[in-house]
């Protein structure tokens, strides 16, 4: 039986949140199902247009964590 993949499956695949087995199944289905491939391409184009965001904590937050760690005896 062929597995029915949803846009949710494709989003998880794009973000590399699928298992190896699921990734292989999706890749096989993409090669066999033109409609699924078109949906994947549309989602992938949208993903590529999203801004790449990086987060970094404020230096004061890092200092507070290290201070707490030193006081509690947890090695830094």
Image (spheres, rainbow, N blue to C red):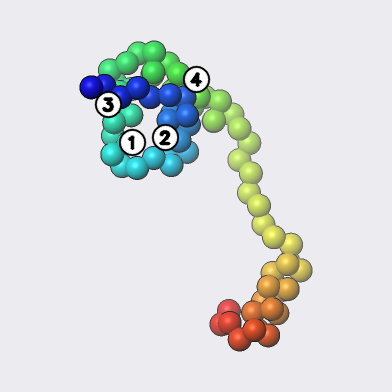
Q: Residue furthest top?
A: 35
Which badge, 1 or 2, comes first in the chain's sequence? 2
Mark 4 against mark 2, which lies toward the viewer? 2
Residue at image location 31% in from the left, 42% down from the top: 20
| C-alpha distance separating marks 1 and 3 | 9 Å
Residue at image location 67% in from the left, 57% down from the top: 56
Sort mark 2 into few (<14), some (14-19) or many (20+) by Cα contacts within 10 Å: some
Q: Residue furthest right?
A: 60
Residue at image location 54% in from the left, 30% down from the top: 47
Residue 42's disc is 4
- Read off the residue under disc 1: 23
Asked if marks 1 and 2 touch (Cβ < 8 Å), the reply is yes
Q: Is residue 39 above or below residue 73?
A: above
- Read off the residue under disc 2: 13
Which badge, 1 or 3, comes first in the chain's sequence? 1
Which badge, 4 or 2, comes first in the chain's sequence? 2
Residue at image location 28% in from the left, 34% down from the top: 24
Asked if marks 3 and 2 touch (Cβ < 8 Å), the reply is no
Front residue of this view, candidates 4 and 51: 4
The secondary structure type at the circle numbered 4 is helix
| Residue 29 location (% of width, % of height) | 30, 23
In the picture, measured across the screen, residue 41 lies left or right of residue 70, that is left
Q: Is residue 48 above or below residue 16?
A: above
Residue 28's disc is 3
| Residue 40 location (% of width, % of height) | 44, 23
| C-alpha distance separating marks 3 and 4 | 18 Å
């Amino acid at each position: 039986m062929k597995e029915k993949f949803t846009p949710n499956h494709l989003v998880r695949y794009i973000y590399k949140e699928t298992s190896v087995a699921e990734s292989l199944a999706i890749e096989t289905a993409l090669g066999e199902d033109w409609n699924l491939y078109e949906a994947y391409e549309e989602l992938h184009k949208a993903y590529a247009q999203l801004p790449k965001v990086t987060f970094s904590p404020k230096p004061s937050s890092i200092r507070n964590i290290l201070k707490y760690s030193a006081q509690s005896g947890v090695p830094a």
